[in-house]
Amino acid sequence: MDESTQLIWSVLFGGIGIGYFSYGKKQKALVPLLAGIALLIFPYFITNTYSMIFTGLTLMALPYFIKQ
């Protein structure tokens, strides 16, 4: 896939990461806060589109399975 696809996925995961971050900060919940930070940062380091999608979906599901 090309760079525009990676850019779209990066923006999508970044937007979801901002939501997780703000929710975690407001509720003082550590797992959504850290998942939000990870969703904001990880697209800078992963260049393969399929790996980016898998990692992003995993990070999005993480707060659902790890509850405090």
Image (tube, grey):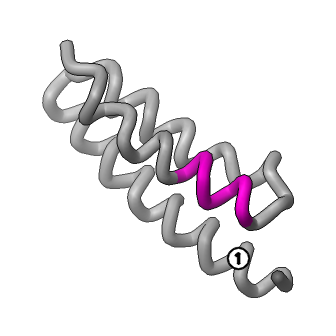
Residue drawn at (63%, 66%) of the image: 10
Residue drawn at (56%, 37%) of the image: 38
Residue drawn at (75%, 66%) of the image: 49
* Residue furthest left in the image: 27
User: Which quadrant: the C terminus?
Assistant: top left
Indicate left or right for 33 with 49 as reference: left
Residue 16, x across and y down, in percent: 39, 58
Judge by depth and name the residue closer to the eye, 31 or 51: 51
Q: Which residue is mark 1?
A: 7
Indicate left or right for 25 with 5 as reference: left
Judge by depth and name the residue closer to the eye, 58 or 8: 58
Placement of 48 over or under 60, stated as above or below: below
Label 1 environment density (alpha carbons within 10 Å; few <14, some 14–19, many ≥20):
few
Residue 31, x across and y down, in percent: 34, 23
* Residue furthest top in the image: 68
Give SS at disc 1. Answer: helix
Asked if residue 24 lies in the magenta stretch, the reply is no
Indicate left or right for 48 with 13 as reference: right
User: Which quadrant: the N terminus?
Assistant: bottom right
Which segment is the magenta one? 50-56
Residue drawn at (55%, 51%) of the image: 56
Majority secondary structure in the magenta region: helix
Report which quarter residue 41 is drawn in. top right
